[in-house]
Image (tube, rainbow, N blue to C red):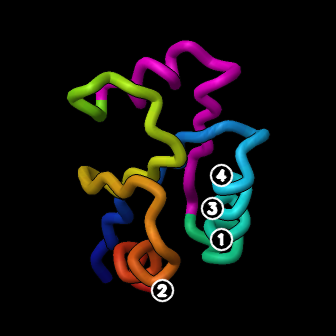
Amino acid sequence: MSKIDIPTIKLYGTSRCHKTQYYLKLLDETKLPYEFLDVETNKDHAEQLRGLYENKKLNFPTITIGSKKLRNPKKDVLEKWLQI
């Protein structure tokens, strides 16, 4: 059997953002491993998110799946990229 490479999934957002909460719930339901990066409570996470955009703004929620970047995606688009 070969090892399947699962891309790293990261959710950049804030705990107080209702859209971020929506994506946290959705990602929990997938049972896929992911990392939540709160850009409000952690400067390093905020800088990582700024680095994803040319305008250097805190565009959240943003989900990265490997090298793919999704800014506030619709559920069907996210599911397509997660292949669930």
Real-space Cα separation, disc 3 to disc 4, in angstroms: 5 Å
Secondary element under disc 2, as helix, strand or loop, is loop
Residue furthest right in the image: 16
**Nearer to us in this view, 72 or 38:** 72
Nearest to viewer (mark 1 / mark 4):
4
Real-space Cα separation, disc 1 to disc 4, in angstroms: 10 Å
Secondary element under disc 4, as helix, strand or loop, is helix
Question: Of the residues shown, which amino acid type is indicated by label 3?
Answer: Tyr
**Nearer to us in this view, 72 or 28:** 72
The answer, for residue 67, to whether it is visible in the render is: yes
**Disc 2: which residue:** 84
First reached walking from the N terminus: tag 2 or tag 1: 1
Q: Is residue 31 left or right of residue 52?
A: right
Q: Are the residues tagged 4 and 2 within 8 Å (C-beta)?
A: no
**Disc 1: which residue:** 26
Where are the magenta residues, as a range? Answer: 33-51
Which quadrant of the structure image shows residue 5? bottom left
Q: Which mark is residue 23?
A: 3
**Disc 4: which residue:** 20
Q: Are the residues tagged 3 and 4 within 8 Å (C-beta)?
A: yes
**Which residue appears at 30% of the width and 34% of the height?**
52
Question: Of the residues shown, which amino acid type is indicated by label 4?
Answer: Thr
